[in-house]
Amino acid sequence: MKAALIHFATERHRWVYAIILTLLVVLGLQLPRIQIDTDPENMLPGHQPERMFHDEVEKRFNLYDVVVVGAVNETDPNGIYNVKSLSALYTLTKEILNLNGVVSPDLMSLSEADNITQGEQNTLRFEWMMKDAPTSQVQVEQIRTAVERLPLLRNTLVSGDGKAAAIYVPIESKDLSYDISQQIKQLTDKLDSDDNYYITGLPVAEDTFGHDMFLQMGISAPLAGLMIFLLMWYFFRSATLVVAPMLVAIITVVLVMGLLIGSGFTVHIMSSMIPIFLMPIAVVDSVHIMSEFADLYKQDDDPKAVISEVVDDLFTPMLYTSLTSAIGFASLLLTPIPPVQVFGGFVAFGILLAFLLTIVFIPAYVVRMNPKRLEALHRRVLSHEAESPLCRVLRAVGRFAFGKPLPIIGFSVILLAISAMGVSRIVINDNPVRWFKPGHEIRVADRVLNEHFAGTYDAYLVLTRATSDADTRSFLKQAHIAVSHLSDQALIDQVNAILDASPFSLESLVETLDDAMFDAQGADSEVLESLLNAAENLQSAGKYFQRPGILKYIESLQNAMMKSGYVGKSNSLTDVVKVVNRELRSGEDEDYTIPTSINGVAQTLLQYQSSHRPQDLWHMVTPDFTSTSIWIQLKSGDNQDMNRLTGFMQQYLRKHPPPEGVDIKWAGKTYINVIWQSAMVTGMLKSLLGAFVIVFFMMVFLFRSVSYGLIAMLPLTLTITLVYGFIGWIGKYYDMPIAVLSALTLGLSVDFAIHFLERFRSLLRTCRSFVKASREIFEEPARAIFRNAVVIAFGFTPLFLAPLEPYITVGAFMAGIMAISCLTTLLLLPAIMSAFSRWLSPNYDSEEDLLCSVEN
């Protein structure tokens, strides 16, 4: 196969160009069909239990993703409670209500909230909290007094210190977050106000990250290409040599992205980074080939023969480095995160495609070059390489590595031990808001608003009570019997259809029976009335969360969460009941309690439904009162903080279990982020361990030696340990980009070792001398390894300019990975080979001769 590929590339170069051009046209035409997905929830598969429950909760309680807008006044003595600030807030609210994509009925603001007060004869009065913009400080103070009496609004719509007010903007779809936030920003810029306005919320952070991410990729990928081009030109001083690897990289990126989009995959946060990963990796093999070709080619040589010899010589190490890199990324297929699987699979495919393109395109490119250019290329490279500072430094490194093995090995062992301690200190944590730089407007808004309010992060503790199956079965049996006595066959069929439906809807049955009563006469009327009464009794018995006992239990859950210190505030059905009960009675604090009877609770809820916002009740409880949720506001979206809360509540529920038949589960975006990030970490660990084992066996197979296989794994092992040990020691959280780096580390760290060991063994067979091989390995092979490390490391440096932390993290740690794996390959491997040369190469020079030779 190797010979056939080389022959095809050198003898059928026009066919090579034609095939590549055809693929570029076919797959390049797929790029305009790109579909972008910036939703981190899609990190979880659709059938994942926690995600399914979260989606069900959103439907059950009619919940929407929310953009949080905050107005802060730190200068006025009254804070936000002044005429100018509240007038601006009123104006802004009315303008936001007119924006497309905003769920207007559910928007929460002072001007859209009810003031609940006592009416006449045990009734309530519902008045708009701020029906019009206030015109006097007296009106403002009335608003302040009203807000402070309503726990549902205090520290949610207005901060406890009175310096900030918030607008909660529900949106139809989370992918509208960025556009709506930008429109709101334009509205705030036009306001005549002394307040500072901030916009935040998880949907905004996630959608803005997606927008900035794709914008950044349009900048970073070309900059990475330019950086790689300049670096290679610096190393080789030949545009002719540099163009070929760059073409391989560009072709690889276009074909892979075209295939991804053409296959129907959306471009997610992860897959958007494919170009920046492939660009540097795709040039590696090309640099090896062009570097050795430039060294070997001489005037009057046949370029076909020389390039064939070079490719034949490098084919095996290039194949195995490509395979190991591909395995590193393909290991991501083992994670339970679909976008990560797509990212890993297509990067792995891209690496193998780059190898194939290198094997066929580079020889085809070389044989088409003008002989004069080839000769000039050789002269420039040779003159530049002969006694360059790089050559002298690398030779000195070789002499030190082969001549002083014990200090190098000892130092490496110490580093390994220190790094292992650092690994044990790693803390797993993430928060999409932290994906932005500290000075980014979203980070600033998040910090300021969470300082003032109870929290801009949401979680929901959902309680569900299953209806009694025995009662339902008994009712259905009796209902079927009763319906059979009706005279209207159409009505019989209609009611039976409802009774036999799965799931059975008691609400639909009550509605149907109630409608049928209007036209019923005689015996039919009696049957329908009896059946309707039975249905309403069953319905009433099913309204579990109207019972005072369970409401008091919910109150105890809220009190426990507040005492834990992990929660800023919670709102629930219990709070509604207590507020309404207080106003129905005396209006005093002593009546801020839960009624003692089901009828008392039902009365409060019936009164509440007379408000301007009756739909708010169904955000807290289902109409059949079989499920309710506690809305929890958190000041932090960090995984660690959410985990502390869930852990605390898990212990509390062990000591204070819910009533029999009540199920309690978590939902909400903050909780879902914990789930997918936890799944990613676990999946990454499994994929890393699995790929590590596979790569080891590949090394043993490649070198036909367990000893060389173990040695080849040293740079990989040391690099992974040092990188993650460093992360642990500096206290950086193990987050999404750090998790992805495990695949990069595994895929690239072993590449240099493969090239070094394979080339050394080849030199050993040619020179028949360990000493000569140890000198030759630090000529062209060491230069190629060093160049590739620099090219890949600096190819990621444009990411330092990004406003997004994950990009900066990837760029910084890629440089570290390349530096460590390169140094390990050029220092530790020679030291190990020198120290154990008697066992590794028993048929060549002795260890003593080697040490004497390298020292001289």
Image (cartoon, grey):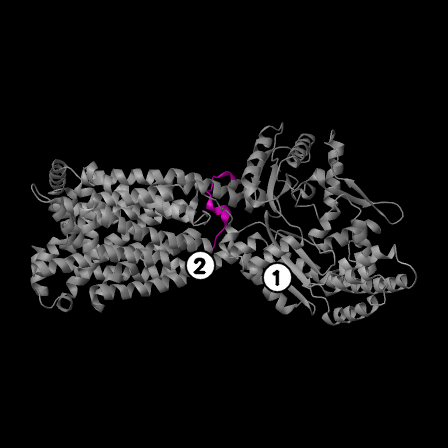
* 460 in relation to 836, above or below: above
Along the polypeptide, which appears first: circle 1 or circle 2?
1
Which amino acid lies under the numbered mark 2 shown in the image of this protein? Val
Q: Quadrant of the C terminus?
A: bottom left
Which region of the structure is painted magenta? 426-441
Question: Image quadrant of residue 545?
Answer: bottom right
Determine if residue 710 is in view: no
Residue 630: image location, x then y, percent: 66, 56
Q: Is residue 739 magenta?
A: no
In-front residue for pair 441/232: 232
* 103 in relation to 718, above or below: above
Residue 494: image location, x then y, percent: 77, 60
- Mark 1 → mark 2, Cα distance in angstroms: 23 Å
Q: Residues within 10 Å of mark 2 (few under 14, many from 20)?
A: many
Question: Image quadrant of residue 611?
Answer: top right
Residue 665, label in figure: 1
* 177 in relation to 726, above or below: above
Q: Main secondary structure of the magenta part?
A: loop
Residue 681, label in figure: 2
Residue sitting at x 70%, y 68%: 659
Q: Secondary structure at mark 2?
A: helix
In-front residue for pair 279/660: 279
Residue sitting at x 46%, y 55%: 338
Determine if residue 243 is in view: yes
Question: Image quadrant of residue 546?
Answer: bottom right
In-front residue for pair 779/63: 63
Q: As drawn, is 826 to the left or to the right of 772?
A: right
Which amino acid lies under the numbered mark 1 shown in the image of this protein? Lys
